[in-house]
Amino acid sequence: MSAATVSKSVDKQALTPLELEIMQVLWSAGPSTASEVVPQLAGNLAYNTVQTMLQVLLRKGRVKRVAEGRAYRYRAAVTRERAAGSAISDLVKRMFGGSAEAMLLAMVDAGQVGAEDLQRARKALQAAEKNAEAAAKEARG
């Protein structure tokens, strides 16, 4: 698969800022109709715009819907954590050539990550390594 093909497939699934804002509403408020989403969004977006964006999210598999009278009630089909993981993965691939280390160093250089953050990350990595080792031992029998 060429780099252009990979980029297009990643971009197709990436959430736009407006899609993300709509997803934030669904994650916070739970299943909602388009008319319930509209007042919770920043700016003065038309109902038709929100309805169109919900249709796009449906095609992307990010939301599911059920008929409710003449409207549809939409719910998030992916967790906030999974969407965040996808967005971070996309960022690492596009901005840092796939290097999480380069991203982390850029965040340190930009003052986005401090010593306390790095200490918590170190502890989380150590715990993840222990869990992976335990799982590998259990798999071996």
Image (cartoon, rainbow, N blue to C red):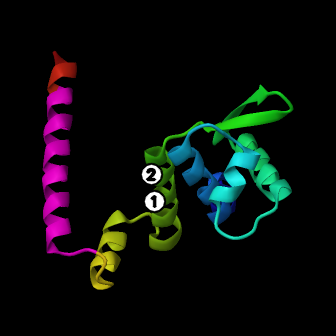
| Residue at the spot 38% in from the left edge and 66% down from the top edge | 99
**CB under 8 Å between discs 2 and 1:** yes
Residue named by callout 2:
85
Spot occupied by residue 11 in the image (x, y as percentages of width and height): 66, 59
Local crowd at mark 1 within 10 Å, few (<14), some, or many (≥20)? some
**Secondary structure under the numbered disc 2 in the rendered image:** helix
| Residue at the spot 17% in from the left edge and 36% down from the top edge | 131
In the rendered structure, the answer to whether residue 40 lies left or right of residue 71 reads left
- Residue sitting farthest toward the bottom: 110
Q: Main secondary structure of the magenta part?
A: helix
- Residue sitting farthest toward the top: 141
Q: Amino acid at mark 1?
A: Ile
Q: Which mark is residue 75?
A: none
Does the segment drawn in magenta span residue 88? no
Residue named by callout 1:
88
Q: In which quadrant is the C terminus drawn?
A: top left
| Residue at the spot 64% in from the left edge and 51% down from the top edge | 13
Q: Amino acid at mark 2?
A: Gly
What stretch of residues is rendered in magenta?
113-136
Image position of 141 with respect to 134: above or below: above
Spot occupied by residue 102 in the image (x, y as percentages of width and height): 35, 72
> In which quarter of the view is residue 77 placed?
top right
